[in-house]
Amino acid sequence: METLMILVFLLPLVLATVLILPPSGSRLGLAIAPLAPLPALLLALGAPAGLTLDVPWLLLGSRYALDETGRVFLGFTGVVWLISGFYAHFYLAADERYRSFWAFFLVTQAGNLGLCLAADAASFYLLFALMTFAAYGLVIHTRSDEARRAGRIYLIMAVMGETALVMGLLMLVHGAGSHYVAGLAAAPVPAPAIWLTTVGFGVKVGLPLLHMWLPLAHPVAPVPASAVLSGVMLKAGLLGWLRFLPLGQAAPEVGANLMVAGLAAAFLAAAAGIMQRDAKVLLAYSSVSQMGYMTLAVGAGLVAPQHWPLLLPAVTLYAVHHALAKSALFLGVGVAKAYGGRSWVLAGQCLPALALAGAPFTSGMAAKLELKAALAGIAAPWGEILPWLLPLGALGTALLMARLLFLLSVESAHGGRRGLVLPWSVLVLLGLLPAWWALGERMLLASTGVVIAASWPLLVASVLAVAVIRLRLRSPILPAGDLVNLMERLFTFRRSTATLNAGEAPR
Amino acid sequence: MTANELLPLAVLASSLLPGFVIFALPESWITARTTLNLFGAITKLGLVFLLLAGVRGGEKYAVRYEVLPSLDLALKADALGLLFVTLSAILWLFTTLYAIGYLEKSPYRSRFFGFFSLCVTATMGIAMASNLFTFFIFYELLTLSTYPLVVHRGNDKAMRGGTIYLAYTLTGGTVLLSGIVWLHHLLGHTEFAHGGIAATLGAEYPLQLKIIFLLLIAGVGVKAALVPLHGWLPQAMVAPAPVSALLHAVAVVKAGAFGIVRIVYEVYGVEFAQSLNLLLPLAILASATIVWGSVRALFQDDLKKRLAYSTVSQVSYIALGVALFGPIGTIGGLVHLVPQGIMKITLFFCAGNYAETLGVHKVSEMDGAGRRMPLTTLAFSIGAFGMVGVPTLAGFISKWYLGLGALEAGMPWVLAVLAASSVLNAAYFLPVLYRAWFRPGPASWPEEHIAARGWRETSALLLLPPLATAMVVVLSGMFAASASSPLAWAHLITDREYLQWKP
């Protein structure tokens, strides 16, 4: 079992190495590459609780462990990587750079799966950085101008995030006198450390203002890469927060700011998403919006530590729900582009879309119920505001999903790619599970009030959507990446006035 | 003469004697020269491992020769010196191999390898000097033996670079000498010792001791390229790639940094230096150098110049670690002697490969270099990411310890310096990697000298050294916590250094 923990990240790394060797040796590697997340899934399903592996000679003394939160993250991360891998196998079959894609895909995967197990600050940081930097290769896979631009912005923000993160971690480790996650939890935490850690992981989570790489990177990456980026890699930032923020202790200042940031992300990103023409950009904004709810919950945990025992399972369930639904939607966009906006494609996409909007008896409703229950009774002013805001947020998501289905319905068939439908359908169906896994019979016993509360945003959204289509209203268009465009313009202006170095990469 | 006295001398002789013989060899005796070079390098490495085993077990190796009463030439192989000796011996072997490949068919090779060997001898002497007088002798020998290497190509640019180099380093040497003489006058001797020797003067001469500290640090600061004494380093880039590699990773710059370590720990003593308020100014100076070097590196299109400014920045990590009062900062500074050396030597080997193989000297010419030379570019990438401080590479370990050391010393602002340096390192290295890996190559390279044959993108002697050092970069970071890592050795030194110190 302990060896399996090493295999979780070693197997993808070895496969990636095999793949970049000369062609003769790499054929086998390519054939089994989609299976690389299997050790992770085996561990998540079958490992005994409290599995720990100490590797004292590695790095600064490494520890890998499987706790319950880690098990859930490892599980859904593994599922999404596995299915996206199979999807990628077909999606990139005719791609000239499929070997480079697979190498980056596997290294990113190694980091992402491994960090679910990392139980010391240095190992977590190592695997997080590995994931971040390797994903650059996924973002710029097509080598188009947009991809290069997205890659540059991704990298700039990633370096900023990593730097803030390592400084935050250093402060945490210094304060605790130990670099093991278990040792960090007990120690009092200096405020700058909380801020730096929040911001460092916040780049990955897509906090407002740190989110700008997201709507640029997701659409340019190949579909299976977008699925893992949006579905599970954003959750790595969330897991970072869960591991390193002093949750269970009070940090009201950071907490309140996080709650505000989460709500801002939830609403503003939904609004920005509605103003998109590209389904993948829309989905990227939807991810920022959904991560906003998880940010809200983490912030609430810092504001009101006594609520954290309830908030943690709620956040975890939300993460599972969003990971499965969002990656299914991304894979579905690829299906829609291949087969056009046919009714069976739209019907399939409806399931995860409804789940995101929190429709009755979906994982979305389960996640939102848990979140509401955990937030109930939180101190003023949040206690008064949230019951009003959360349903409005659901309405925003429902409108966003309506827009998505509309965009997909007018998609024309580009054809050509076989084998995409099966992995997509599997993921869509898997998305139905978490609701029952978390709530079981409570789902069936949901009161009419709950069902109505979950339904009305959908009804309102449907009515609005039909009205918009009937009246032939057109939404204004917001350029993907929103503020970054403004910043780039300022930067270019400064660049053209002051002659800068020739060594910089040209635009 | 006992074996314990003989061993340090043998370490010196293993490069000095081959050096003398090589001077005398005719230009065309390639095999004899190569054999001698490698024989010397491998013998030295063997001797160094003997020393390492002995010192770990508590053995003392020292030898002393009285020049004048109270003025001794003295060598000792202690833990601190051995860190530098080992690094130099290993990298000398790689650089020798590389230089053999690099200078193939070029003129004046006997002269080159002769001075090359002298240069390494001087470095070993600096590492093992056990008083300031001996340190100074070898320090000047280093200046004189590197000058012919810098001007090896003999063209106008090389001569100008060499003149600037001499002007800076000889001035620095004079300043250093004046500090040493002054201190000798006050103390009557300049022997290095754990915990320092200046403390015995107590509070008698605080002002004089401060001025002497300034003179000594300024003297070695020239070679360590502390801002504003760094002007020679980018000019010395005219030297052939193996020389630049040696200058930046092992010999000159590192000798300066090592001098700072000796002066702070074994002449003044870190606690006494702290009580004289000397550490904070040093930390500020080092921080300024770190940031300034990185900022200048951003604007260099010449690849070797960019690396040179990067050295200015990275070497000051060592000075910074020394200036952080407390064992963890010390570990960070000491351990960075090693990563900085192996990462920088890797980068310079690679820069040399691009120049020799493709005629690529500029960052702006590097588009597509990764496709043409994947192994070289892989090694370059490892070195670059190490410089940025990404784990598991060696640079991460020193950054981690420096950060913790800064917090321990109550100087959290140093974290901001480290953060700025990481970001700047990323800003000047990542665009290079981006060009090499992700941009399409040109129709033809500026001057393609060596054609690719199968996996051999360039000649084997050029390719293997950077691959080997890149592997060391990975391994020394990955296995940092193991008992035989540089980190473990830095712990050993620190334990011995802070014997009296209790927090």
Image (tube, helix red, strand yellow):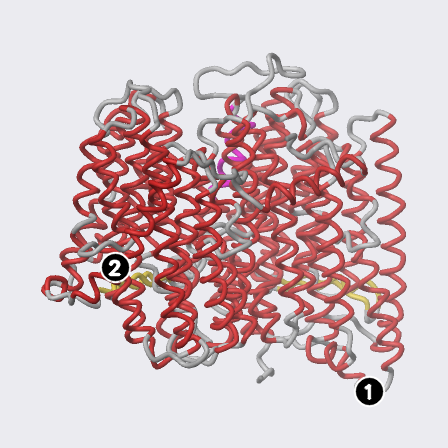
Q: Residue at x 63, y 71 (%)?
A: B412
Q: Give the percent coordinates (x, y) of residue A491.
A: 70, 42
User: Which residue does the image show at 52% across and 24% down from the upper left?
Assistant: B373
Horizontal and vertical percent for residue A398? Answer: 33, 50
Labels 2, 1: one chain: no
Q: Is residue B478 left or right of residue B18?
A: left
Is residue B463 highlighted in magenta? yes
**Quarter occupied by the N terminus of chain A:** bottom left
Tell me if B361 is positioned left or right of A348 in this view. right
Inspect the image, locate mark 1, and give the three-letter code of the amino acid beneath it.
Answer: Ala
Q: Quadrant of residue B283?
A: bottom right
Asked whether B159 or B17 is in front, the reply is B159
Q: Is residue B396 visible?
A: yes
Residue stretch rendered in magenta on the structure: B460-471
Helix, strand or loop at disc 2? helix
Of circles 2 and 1, the one toward us is 2
Q: Is residue A299 left or right of residue A112?
A: right
- Residue A454, labelled with which disc? 2
Point 41% across, 76% down: residue: A384
Disc 2 and disc 1: Cα gap in Å? 79 Å
Q: Which residue is mark 1?
A: B203
Nearer to the camera, B139 or B245 = B245
Which of the two residues, B268 or A59, is positioned nearer the viewer here? A59
* Left or right: residue B32 compared with residue B238: left
